[in-house]
Amino acid sequence: MGHGMKATIALAAALCGTPAFAGWEPTKPVEIVVAAGAGGASDQMARMMQAAIQKNNLMKQPMVVSLKGGASGAEALMYMKSSEGDPNKVLIAYSLIYMLPLSAKIPFNWRELTPVSVIALDQFVLWDNSAGPKTVKEFVEAAKAASSPFKMGGTGSKREDHVLTVFLEQKTGAKFSYLPYKSGGEAATQLVGNHTEANVNNPSENLEVWRAGQVRPLCVFDKERISYTSKVTDTQSWADIPTCKEEGVDVQYLMLRAMFLPGKVTAEQQAFYVELFHKVTQTAEYKDYMEKQALKPIFLTGKDMVQFLEEDDATNKALMTEAGFVAK
């Protein structure tokens, strides 16, 4: 069959609304692999996608969520690495794919997997207890004046929360003592109980305690404000939180949320999932989730995704190196 004929069939299929890649689809349940524990942001996102796929009949086979958060997420990475050629496993990845191989020296490289799509970017916010300082300036002054370093709660040593803490120290001259907890939820609870002075949780992890008036968002680590304008508390929306740069602390960091297949799958298998996750981003479930969790919408595949990953890898490596977190 000539290329012209193939293109015509693909076009006809596209016009009829049937997938052009009718050649391959999963014949058994698909495992969505989460490199973190239950209840965290990755687990929540995986369950949202599972529900969106099921409710909108986007795939004949069911999708099952598989939690592999052991060894700080290394379990999931090595599981994907050892599943070469298996198109029934898809990883929901985040900055762990760059940071863990550097800090823990595990024999893993994201380039060994098959990129599918980047589906969101995660924001980080500097939070303190609502009884604490009201602005970044007051917070930094209080931290500098404190007799012992302010306690900063986070999830995972030598990872994004810890990196942000080191950069806050470098930019402000204040000292922090970093305390890793099992989850963002636990870091939130510690802040509400005044056992820590601050955390840099993702919006989703502090949403409920912010709504309850127990914590205060001081600034967002991005070059622009969060876009969502509907009120979260009685008085504030996500868009009301200033950027840290606006507040005089120029630290920016966004974390990818991306889908990967194991290495050595076919182009048809990859194309099936590109199409599947594109359909997921069009669902009401995805759109509601993005606003509720204050995530930044994005959809990258193919060359654009690989270019993004290469640049993101370089950024994360530079941050890890500067923070002194790369294992010798």
Image (cartoon, rainbow, N blue to C red):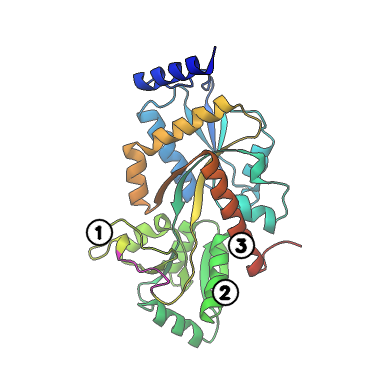
Above or below — where is 151 with respect to 282?
below
**Of all residues shown, which one is farthest toward the left?**
234
- Viewed as shown, does residue 94 lie left or right of 288? right
Above or below — where is 52 with respect to 9?
below
Q: Callout 1: helix, strand or loop?
A: loop
Find out whether residue 198 is within the magenta segment: no
Cα separation, mark 3 vs mark 2, equals 12 Å
Image quarter in which the C terminus is found: bottom right
Instruction: Tell me the tag on residue 90.
Output: none
Q: Which residues are magenta?
A: 240-246
**Of all residues shown, which one is farthest toward the right?**
328
Write the residue at 36% across / 58% down: 207
- Percent x, y of residue 142: 45, 84
- Percent x, y of residue 252: 48, 65
Please state which amino acid type lies under the numbered disc 2: Ser
Identify the main secondary structure in magenta. loop
Instruction: Tell me the tag on residue 157.
Output: 3
- Percent x, y of residue 85: 65, 28
Write the residue at 61% across / 26% down: 266
Find out whether residue 244 is within the magenta segment: yes
> Within the image, what quadrant is residue 59 found in?
top left
Q: Report the residue marked by disc 1.
A: 231
- Viewed as shown, does residue 122 lie left or right of 28? left
The nearer-to-camera label among 1 and 3 is 1
Cα separation, mark 1 vs mark 2, equals 33 Å
How crowded is the residue under tag 1: few (<14 C-alpha within 10 Å), some, or many (20+)?
few
Q: Earlier in the sequence, mark 1 or mark 3?
A: 3
- Given contact means CB atoms under 8 Å apart, are the residues at marks 3 and 2 in contact? no
Please state which amino acid type lies under the numbered disc 3: Ser
Q: Report the residue marked by disc 2.
A: 177
